[in-house]
Amino acid sequence: MTSRPSAGPPRPRLVVVGSGMAATRLVEELVARGAPARMEITVLGDEEAAPYNRILLSAVLEGTHRPEALTLRVPAWYAAQGVDLRLGARVLGVDRERRDVMLVDGTLVEYDALVLATGSIPSLPPIRGLVRIDGSLHDAVHSFRSLADCERLLSVLPTCRRAVVVGGGLLGLQVARALGVRGIGTEVVEGADHLLHQQISAPAGRVLARDLHRLGVAVYTGARAVRLVEGPHGPALRLDNGATLDTDLVVLTAGGRPSTALARGAGLAVRRGVVVDDRLASVTDPTVHALGDCAEHAGRTTGFVPPAWEQAGVLADILCGAPTSYDGSRVVARLRATDLDVAVLGDAAAEVAAGGEVVEVANPIAGSHRRLVVRDGRIVAATLVGDLSRIGLITQHFDRRTVLGPEEPGRLLMPERTGASDDSAVALLPDDAEVCACAGVTAGRIRACSSLEQARDTTRATTGCGGCAGTVRQLVTHRTDPVALATAQRGI
């Protein structure tokens, strides 16, 4: 039962613009601190759908998840916590002098503190023919950023045999793999010289391209799409290398950028994102905060779930009056796609430039490439493609900044011993080993839960990228089945 605040002076008004994953996590953190009893919290989401997990949209496209399974919190949950959630509430502008937010229907929402969690928006790549004279997209062209985008794409799939995905980043590969699982012949076009060029090295990118080819997805790297034309068999995408790709569908996954129009319109400092200080407050106005994809801290924007959720926890403390500050995010990224395994920790290129030493093990034939960057005996970055059997232990050393012996980095990159089962590896995880990078959840917290549903609700594990779902399920099984746990620990 939600407690009613006692009569007294007016409570401060907090308005959160955005209802995505960062905003939802912020509200959860505020609720955990009892903030609704001390402040009025209003959340303005411009989509009609309840807050949902964008990372798992590709799972809906693939057919492994139903749309309703992506919901993070239903509107009734907000009401029960005393939080005013308004869906379909698009914000027109922010007046910092009057301290209010205007919605497109003319409604004014006053604030004492404002949080911008506006995320990122797609930007059209410079491909001629994507947009008609009237400003509408060509019928064959789709973006993939929202649940509505996903539903539109699903509606046309029954009539499609071929698709081209523009962009070889994490989102592009997830979409390409999802389309491939649906039986659609898929090609990926990436302008850089290798896939995931912002996260992994060229050799790892080549291994990933081979993995995709094995799964039936063609890859064109070092090539840019320049024009959508009408060919003899329907739409075709022309590349700058002279190739022309016949297609029924073009999915745009490249070119996303922080959504900063509201901040610019309000006169806040904006570079790539909304510029914030160590309290995640705008450097222009301390009553306005930003977090997630739209925020720029220390010259960096992120674009991943773990940093956004880390920021949400820090900002909740700050809004509740705790003397804390934000010192930057660790980079943690996972590719969520069937039969494709990629994990990234830290910024490998920057750490190598800073003097880090590279330890690398590759087996292109088996489709694996594993790389650590070590400085002063500590793992400062890692990229793993095709074999994530040691990701839990590597992440543990990365987070703890463990000083390793000379032979240890190499041993960490070797596969698990022959005959070792996934169950035994999970059962032997120490309680303080992190199993959900998105939510920062340890094995011990999962073992304390009696069911997968309880683990999701109380820790938020599996609700980010979804990469930890198998491990969480096994931990809960071991927790509730002593025989299975004993067997796994004996290695039987």
Image (cartoon, helix red, strand yellow):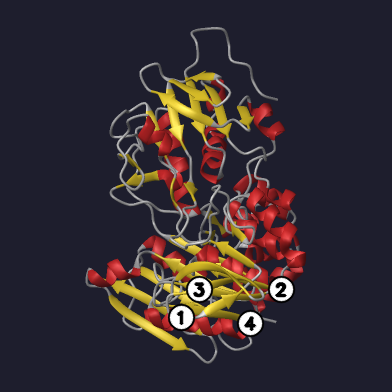
User: How far is the residue under mark 4 from the one under mark 3?
Assistant: 21 Å
User: How far is the residue under mark 4 from the one under mark 1?
Assistant: 22 Å
Q: Is residue 14 above or below residue 454?
A: above
Q: Are marks 1 and 2 in contact (CB under 8 Å)?
A: no
User: How far is the residue under mark 3 from the one under mark 2?
Assistant: 18 Å
Q: What is the secondary structure assignment of the residue under circle 1?
A: loop
The label number, if any, that marks residue 207 in the structure image: none
Disc 4: which residue? 216
User: How far is the residue under mark 3 from the one under mark 1?
Assistant: 7 Å
Q: Amino acid at mark 3?
A: Arg
Q: Who's the residue at 60% across and 63% down the image?
A: 468
Which of the 4 image quarters holds residue 51?
top right
Disc 3: which residue? 238
Q: Amino acid at mark 4?
A: Gly
Residue 143 x %, y %: 57, 56
The label number, if any, that marks residue 161 in the structure image: 2
Among the two numbered marks 4 and 3 on one chain, the one whose residue lies closer to the N terminus: 4
**Residue toward you, 311 or 274:** 274
Query: Farthest residue in the top direction?
Result: 8
Q: Who's the residue at 35% across and 81% down the image?
A: 359
Q: Are marks 4 and 1 in contact (CB under 8 Å)?
A: no
Which of the 4 image quarters holds residue 389?
bottom right
User: How far is the residue under mark 1 from the one under mark 2?
Assistant: 23 Å
Disc 1: which residue? 242
Label 3: few (<14), some (14–19) or many (≥20) C-alpha neighbours in 10 Å: some
Among the two numbered marks 1 and 2 on one chain, the one whose residue lies closer to the N terminus: 2
Q: Amino acid at mark 2?
A: Arg
**Residue toward you, 258 or 316:** 258
Apparent side of residue 141 relative to residue 190 in the rendered image (left or right): right
Among the two numbered marks 3 and 2 on one chain, the one whose residue lies closer to the N terminus: 2
Q: Is residue 172 above or below residue 111?
A: below
